[in-house]
Image (cartoon, helix red, strand yellow):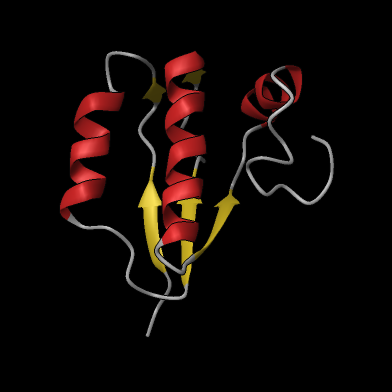
Amino acid sequence: MPTKQWIAPQELTIFEVGPLWQAYQADPPRDSEFNLDLAHVATLDSAGAQLLLYLVHHSKQQGCLPRIVALPDSIRSILNQLGLQKSLGLEEPV
């Protein structure tokens, strides 16, 4: 079975997280692996970072192995500044 992929939009901000969370809840991962594809994300605020944290946490609770893939350098820098690399399961500091 292919790994479920959640593709984040260009803006992962307070204005987007509500509908994104509802979409996730409507179709949560059911496989052992779950990819969070951030390739298209250009804007990330604290609400978007919180959504990423919760998606990782919730996926783990459901028995999935969440993985962040295609992380743009600009978003990597923000996550590093926020100190979230370990909480998001990134293997090494970003």
From the viewer's perspective, tell me whether residue 70 is left or right of residue 9: right
Q: Residue at x 78, y 51 (%)?
A: 91
Q: Residue at x 34, y 14 (%)?
A: 14
Of residue 4 and residue 66, the one placed in the foreground of this image is 66
Q: Is residue 58 above or below residue 38?
A: below
Q: Is residue 76 above or below residue 32?
A: above
Of residue 19 and residue 25, the one placed in the foreground of this image is 25
Confirm whether residue 40 shows in the render: no
Q: Residue at x 84, y 46 (%)?
A: 92
Of residue 1 and residue 70, the one placed in the foreground of this image is 1
- Which quarter of the figure has residue 3? bottom left
From the viewer's perspective, tell me whether residue 73 is left or right of residue 16: right
Q: Is residue 20 above or below residue 90?
A: above
Q: How many marks?
A: 0
Q: Position of residue 10 (x, y in %)?
A: 39, 27
Q: Position of residue 87 (x, y in %)?
A: 66, 40
